[in-house]
């Protein structure tokens, strides 16, 4: 089991459990159509954002299959939540996890997602002892695919026509990294 009730500092960010007062910052990006474009939800209004934040506030541990660890990605100088990063425990028995993230477009292109994702992969592989972590994205989401590749994840599959999504058939890309690959990349620096 892994429980996070403390902040994690990276070189430029703080990753911490969500708080109810994060709703305004989360709403600033979850309400945007360009953010929701590849998400399974539509742009969220204040009530839906509040519900989403209340859910993320409770997502602080990985103990059972399906549990999600949701962390607010905070820019220390401003205290602004610039995005969210998640690790889902897919299978405790088989030590499988899934990485996901959403960032405000104003804070994209600065390496924040990569920095936060490395910290969460470290939690998954080093603290939780996962064997394999996957990342999935809409096939048209070049930004997410690029992030997963920068992390050193391998593209394993393109699933065609996986679901009828926002008026069209959706294709998904699946990336993965094994613990031994993580350790090898860490040894290289």
Image (cartoon, grey):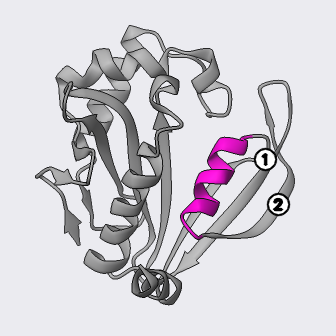
In the figure, 88 relative to 78: above or below? below
Which quadrant is the C terminus positioned in?
bottom left
Q: Which residues are magenta?
A: 141-152
Discs 1, 2 touching: Cβ within 8 Å? yes
Q: Residue at x 72, y 44 (%)?
A: 142
Q: Residue at x 53, y 37 (%)?
A: 109
* Crowd rating for badge 1 (residues with CA inside 10 Å; few <14, some 14–19, many 20+): some
Q: Residue at x 62, y 16 (%)?
A: 33
Q: Element at badge 1?
A: loop
Check disc 2 and report the residue beneath it: 158
Q: Earlier in the sequence, mark 1 or mark 2?
A: 1
Q: Position of residue 101 (x, y in %)?
A: 48, 45
Instruction: Provide the major secondary structure of the magenta segment.
Output: helix
Q: In the picture, residue 187 is in which quadrant? A: bottom left
Q: Nearer the viewer, residue 17 or 91?
A: 17
Q: Position of residue 115 (x, y in %)?
A: 39, 54
Q: Residue at x 30, y 29 (%)?
A: 81
Query: How many numbered marks appear?
Result: 2
* Crowd rating for badge 2 (residues with CA inside 10 Å; few <14, some 14–19, many 20+): some
Which quadrant is the N terminus positioned in?
bottom left
- In the image as oriented, which residue stretches furthest toward the left? 6
- In-image side of 15 versus 32 (left or right): left
- In-image side of 135 versus 75 (left or right): right
Q: Element at badge 2?
A: strand
- In-image side of 38 versus 111 (left or right): right
Mark 1 and mark 2: span between their CA atoms? Answer: 8 Å
Q: Position of residue 48 (x, y in %)?
A: 42, 17
In the figure, 5 relative to 92: above or below? above
Q: Position of residue 123 (x, y in %)?
A: 30, 68
Check disc 1 and report the residue beneath it: 139
Residue 149 counted in the magenta span: yes
Q: Nearer the viewer, residue 10 or 66?
A: 10
């Amino acid at each position: 089991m892994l429980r996070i009730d403390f902040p994690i500092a990276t070189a430029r960010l703080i990753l911490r459990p969500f708080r109810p007062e994060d709703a305004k910052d989360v709403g600033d990006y979850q309400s945007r159509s360009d953010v929701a474009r590849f998400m399974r939800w539509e742009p969220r209004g204040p009530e839906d954002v509040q519900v989403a934040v209340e859910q993320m506030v409770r997502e602080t541990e990985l103990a059972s299959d399906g549990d999600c660890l949701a962390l607010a990605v905070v820019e220390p100088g401003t205290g602004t939540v610039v995005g969210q990063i998640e690790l889902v425990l897919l299978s405790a028995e088989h030590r499988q996890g899934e990485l996901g993230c959403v960032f405000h477009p104003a804070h994209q292109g600065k390496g924040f997602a990569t920095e936060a994702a490395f910290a969460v992969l470290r939690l998954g592989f080093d603290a939780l002892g996962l064997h394999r972590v996957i990342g999935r994205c809409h096939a048209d989401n070049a930004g997410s695919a690029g992030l997963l590749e920068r992390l050193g994840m391998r593209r394993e599959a393109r699933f065609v026509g996986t679901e009828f999504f926002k008026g069209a058939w959706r294709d998904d890309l699946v990336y993965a990294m094994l613990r031994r690959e993580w350790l090898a990349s860490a040894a290289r620096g």
